[in-house]
Image (cartoon, rainbow, N blue to C red):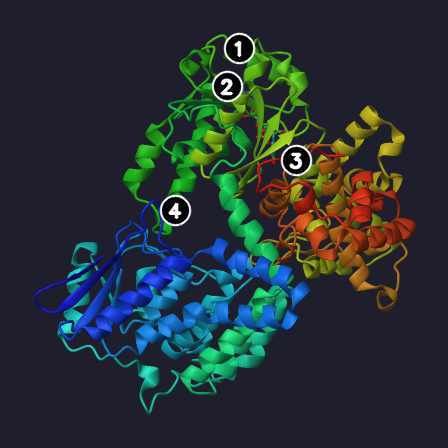
Amino acid sequence: TVETDADGIALITWDMPGRSMNVFTEEAMDELDRVIDQVAGDAGIKGAVFTSGKNTFSGGADISMLHKIMTRFHEEKARDREKAVRQLFEEAGRMSWLWRKLETSGKPWVSAINGTCMGGALELSLACHGRVVADEEAVRLALPEVKIGIFPGAGGTQRVPRLTGAEEALRMMTSGQNLSPQKAKAVGLVHEVVPRRRLIEAARKMILDGLRSVQPWDEKDFKVPGGPVYSAAGANLWPAAIAILRRETYGNYPGAAAILKCVYEGLLVPFETGLRIEQRYFAQILQTREAEAMSRSMFISLQELNKGARRPKDVPARKLKKVGVLGAGFMGAGITYVTAKAGIPVVLIDRDQETADRGKAHSARLMDDLIKKGRATEAEKEKLLSLITATPDYAALEGADLVIEAVFEDSDVKKEVIQKAEAFLKSSSIFASNTSTIPIKGLAKNSKRPGNFIGIHFFSPVERMMLVEIIQGRKTGEKALAVAMDYARAIRKTPIVVNDTRGFYVNRCVLRYMQEAYSMLAEGVPAPMIENAARMAGMPVGPLALTDETAIDLAQKIMRQTVRDLGEKAVDPRHMELIDTMADKHGRLGRKNGKGFYEYPPKPAKKYLWPGLKELYPQQAPEKIDVEELKARFLYVIALEAARVMEEGIVTDPREADVGSILAFGFAPYTGGVLSFIDGVGTGEFVRRAQDLQKKYGKQFKPPKLLLQMAENGESFYERFRPETGQLVKAA
Ligand code: NAI
């Protein structure tokens, strides 16, 4: 809506009907275009204040629109490449030139940022001549585009460095990190930070005080703060910027690399030429596989799953009024915290009062950390703690809608607590287990109502890991599934639905990753090369460091259990020997005893690889090792396991496989996740390469039948298991 007041100031309030957040769709841009003309053409209007009618200011460009542009390009380039490129170039610049039109329309515009302001919306605000922000804890400003494989392509790479200097601009855009209103003001991104109730008044005042309608960079003698080449400290910033980018991305993220090019080239030329340079790079980035795969998995699929794409539709949503947690140990304490954080009352049970209290104290500690960082108040801590009842008394579970057990990983202990709890539960309550290895169908046998029995598998640390696996046992009913999904949503985690199987989905893939590293060690590949190759492939944590985190004796326990259940052949004897040597002979159990594949000296010294590793196997000469092949082995061995999981129908939706792989173990995010990785390589090529690796390194690289079939048909995962239509094609 546009309202003009007595002073001749137009107040433009953006409030998209039927959406919880404003985003720039084609129509929204068309409308803004008309409004810009209206303001410019009306002699009675002095200037404009632009704000949002929602709680947040705006999320920026509509990512589904961007993603459609990308997929259309890939379809059309097959027919007429030149035309497709031309069209993409136009579309890539649409926003940027509209923002430029506003900036040069001759009237002063002020953006009144009343809430969180992201991406294209922040870029629009930067094109406004004035910017005021509401002074509130929840308000964040960011250009997060790199996180979905692209970069700020609507003037961001040109305006930010001209406001803040190149160094700060690079930091902000290559990390995609949030800025608080105060920080945004300190770096020169906004003019004023004022209490929310004074926001519009302050914006109007800027115009009435004679705000110019010409941006600094359009003035004749404009200079980039600090100049285009030097940092605040006076050193040439580019060699360092390039080195940091390489260290952080290993060249895997074209979007991040393009930011450096845009800023470097753009600051050497006049502003509008800079915009053209940015447009050219933006169009190039939209053509990349990484941009398409990342925006799909990290934005579109993620949102769909969060909104309950896989939730049974017929079960009405139910607000959870009370949740029980059994076991106040490492996991139970974390589950209690995230549940109370969501405002749900929790009963936390352990064997005695003291242990239960210790579990509750974990929540107090986490809140204290937040208070120290200024992200929570004492009152919020007290309120959260008041929601948690710690007790050894099962009767307190009465009335709980959902109970989650996280007691010892032991079938007998679990059986006991299931029966004890059920004695106090109403017939509609759902019972969930957080077991990591015991099949849900076995545990459900201890329940009087297996239809209400389900697995909710968390990852540690619970408060930080964004994924939960919802495990369906053979008898788990739709209602249990719906309640588990509603719970995941309430605690703001992303659920993926997984059918009951050994290791479920995530741990099966993670084990493959770690075991491939054990094979490499046994082959005599130096440990630093193994860890580096994994990082270079895009994994956030090397496989040996990851083994240390989860504990070497746990790896040993899992292998021994696997041998007992599936026989000697199920475990590679070289892996068993390595782990036994580490744990039994050298007493190296991982991070927890300060001795694993790494040494953990007291802080602030950094961990380093245990030198004794070199003595375990005759070492290959590093120059003879093909690092590219090491990288490929990690990605392929995980992706192949995921393909098997799809073949077995353990996971049925490629969105869940992809999003799960990134959230749970950080599978090379630039690929868009495990299955997008295979699709990106192409199933035919992927199978050929896997068979090649199989010949050299063993059966872990054997492609499953499903993949062979898909390769023969030239099919991709997203074609075969069409998630968009909601009609999943059954696995082979
Ligand atoms: P933990 O040993 O830290 O905690 C277990 C707690 O259960 C202890 O506080 C213990 O006193 C309590 N407990 C034992 N018997 C009980 C009984 N009869 N009644 C009430 N409380 C009882 O173990 P952790 O690591 O928290 O694991 C718990 C469960 O979560 C296990 O099933 C494990 O497999 C699973 N899990 C663990 C993950 C991890 O990273 N540690 C990740 C995902 C699942």
Residue at the disc numbered 2: 430
What is the crowding at mark 1: few (fewer than 14 residues within 10 Å), some, or many (at least 20)?
few
What is the crowding at mark 2: few (fewer than 14 residues within 10 Å), some, or many (at least 20)?
many
Q: Do the residues labelled 3 and 1 touch (CB within 8 Å)?
A: no
Would you say the beta carbon of the disc 1 residue lies within 8 angstroms of ligand 1? yes
At horizontal 47% and vertical 69% (from top left) the residue drawn is 153
Tell me, for residue 420, which label it has, or none: 1
Tell me, for residue 256, which label it has, or none: none
Near-viewer residue (527 or 320): 320
Label 3: state its secondary structure.
loop
* Amino acid carrying mark 2 in the image: Ile
* Amino acid carrying mark 4 in the image: Leu
Residue 560: image x %, image y %? Answer: 80, 30
Residue 19: image x %, image y %? Answer: 36, 46
Residue at the disc numbered 3: 652
At horizontal 35% and vertical 56% (from top left) the residue drawn is 58
